[in-house]
Amino acid sequence: MTISLNDIAERAGVSVKTVSGALHGGSARMSDDTRLRIKEIAEELGYVTNFAARSMRQGWMPLIGVIADELVTSPFATGIIGGLDSGARASDMAVFAMTLSGRRNVASVLEEMHRFRPRAVAYAAMYHKRVELPAEFAETVGVMINCREANDRVTSLVPDETGAALEMTNYLLNAGRRNIAYINLPGLLASELREIGFRQALDQAGFNGTEATVLPAVNRAIYSDRAQSLVHSHVQRLMRFPQRPDAILCGNDRVAMEVYAALRRCGAAIPDDVAVASFDNQVEIASRLDPPLTTMALPHRAMGRKAAQILLAEDRPPVEVKKLPFRLVERSSV
Amino acid sequence: MTISLNDIAERAGVSVKTVSGALHGGSARMSDDTRLRIKEIAEELGYVTNFAARSMRQGWMPLIGVIADELVTSPFATGIIGGLDSGARASDMAVFAMTLSGRRNVASVLEEMHRFRPRAVAYAAMYHKRVELPAEFAETVGVMINCREANDRVTSLVPDETGAALEMTNYLLNAGRRNIAYINLPGLLASELREIGFRQALDQAGFNGTEATVLPAVNRAIYSDRAQSLVHSHVQRLMRFPQRPDAILCGNDRVAMEVYAALRRCGAAIPDDVAVASFDNQVEIASRLDPPLTTMALPHRAMGRKAAQILLAEDRPPVEVKKLPFRLVERSSV
DNA sequence: GCGCTTTGGGTTATCGATTACTCACTTGAT
DNA sequence: ATCAAGTGAGTAATCGATAACCCAAAGCGC
């Protein structure tokens, strides 16, 4: 049997309310003497608050629910959940994640979640996308993380893809690179937005299109051999151009990995002959490559923390789409 | 305001107890007519069970708590949490994970967890290790996943490292390989146990030690250049041996990745000249390598599922250490 | 000395679901 | 016709923490 406030009250010879006040209500009126004595007894008996009981009165459990659209364990989830967790902990809340896997749909997972009466619920996607949320849940879900609700009826936190590409391209330009190729992953929302930023930066710098090249890598199965050979052939062709690129910007770190291999085969040195830069900062890849890859880190942790802030705010702020900045991680590939 | 049984009872003109019986108590005595009518009203009002309230009587929430010793997001966690989740769902339980990060110790995280009154608690490690659990928690934690309690006072589920190495080595022997080198990662529990299996298999096959070689890779920072060069130099030396190995068994998939690169530099073909095999089945690596890597898959999912079974069993089985078998994933590197 | 405020703490109702107990009304057997 | 068994459903207590409300004693100004 677990210890309850009642057990402590009995032992201390006071009423439950006094015990409750002593342990939780910081400002409850009582002598320091009583408070201290009660705390000691609680400690001694090994009392642990029963959140379920408390929630009967509060109406909610100190939980932030997260509906994740992939198993909560992609390398990308680390940052989101971690940020959410640190933001939640600041308000003595815990994060409770449920995964949208197999044939479970949003509606059923949300209902399952609501059985636990979380204080607030967020929806998190593993990669930047648009998500169609059934209309009746637009109010239930407080924040979309790493995704936008199809009709923007819910506050969304997404990476500022375009801004990141702008920044990274300018970084390459500032490093003296003039002939920049961009190997993209078509079909992904992130890629499309990054491409916009890339072009913007070149426009602003006064370059016209002919000096820059945008080439597609393969979208879906980036593990397959075809993808690899596609990047390889792109790189080979690029290196035979009269105006050989002096920098290659990659859609993400995986593409960069293939570009590294392709450049090595062509005998091009990184960064001396060709600088390589990329997006995501998938640490296992980026810091492992030789030379270590300069890349824009996704603001996963920041999105998580910000989400907690928004969800736990006193008054829910108006719906908006917040674009969070990437962080430039300088390694030695530029 | 959320809907309660009371609201439904009022609307249906019956008592709460009848509503409770109709919705949850499968065998409660009442006319099908009443039951159906109540269910319809519940549906219409959007009733969602309040687990907190239910738990007041049950004494626990339908939760399986997991204390994870790393952020719940290593690629290895996928299987454990996923298995746990599928096992839990079969009993209408949810998985509630908390991470042991920063300066939070087991005691404080366990207390935090107990506030939610989970039905059972498991401890999960991200890689196979021994864990020192404070004595007072040996009874609180029901199962250790992927780790063993220092004094084996708690039922543990761990991968059968030795058996896996035995099986894989025999697989190589059956494939006609006779000169097998093993490049190990010293200092890791898993590696040491695998090495035992490797030696056992050779012994059983009647080989003496001279024909097999066990070489160390670097333990900690396997991303560093030194590690890479260590493996490289091992491989180079091996390939110059009079009795050149025809197979290299690797401590894990990362080591295999480096071995691939080293072999390529030596001009050795996989698997024609040298077969390569490994452990873990880190899919992102193993299926990506060229040729795809044959490796023993860690039983993460199985451990998770088994853990749920044990935790939710009617009567807690006696403490034991269960070794779960790996699964041989045949690709084309042997 | 009287009434008024402050301090310390008790009483009791409440949140929502469950359950032991009770009760009224049918049936069916004797 | 009467009693026993069975059926359908209500009553009220309960779980643990909290909060509104109440009360007694002490301190204070006049």
Image: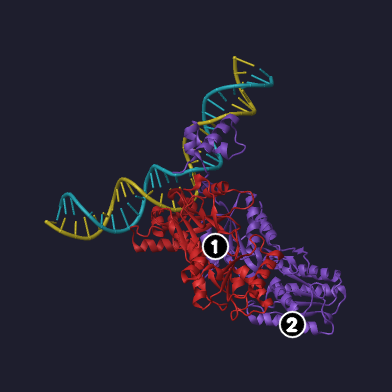
Chain colours: A red, B purple, C cyan, D yellow
On the rendered image, what quadrant is the N terminus of chain B found in?
Answer: top left
Instruction: State the image coordinates of residue A118 (x, y, percent, origin top left).
Output: 49, 52
Q: Is residue B300 visible?
A: yes
User: Identity of the amino acid at label 2?
Assistant: His
Task: Tell me which residue sits at (65%, 53%) in the image.
Answer: B86
Q: Nearer the viewer, residue A184 or A283?
A: A184
In the structure shown, which secondary structural element does the residue marked by tag 1 occupy?
Answer: helix
Residue B236 against residue B71 in the figure, above or below? below
The answer for which chain carries disc 2 is B
User: Identity of the amino acid at label 1?
Assistant: Leu
Q: Are the residues under badges 2 and 1 in a single subunit?
A: yes
On the rendered image, what quadrant is the C terminus of chain B found in?
Answer: bottom right
Q: Is residue B31 visible?
A: no
Instruction: State the image coordinates of residue A78 (x, y, percent, origin top left).
Output: 56, 64
Closest to the camera, between mark 2 and mark 1, is: 2
- The residue that mark 1 highlights is B110
Residue B191 against residue C14 in the figure, above or below? below
Indicate which disc residue B234 carries.
Answer: 2
Q: Is residue A57 left or right of residue A66?
A: left
Q: Nearer the viewer, residue B243 or A334?
A: A334
Instruction: State the image coordinates of residue B331 (x, y, percent, origin top left).
Output: 77, 65
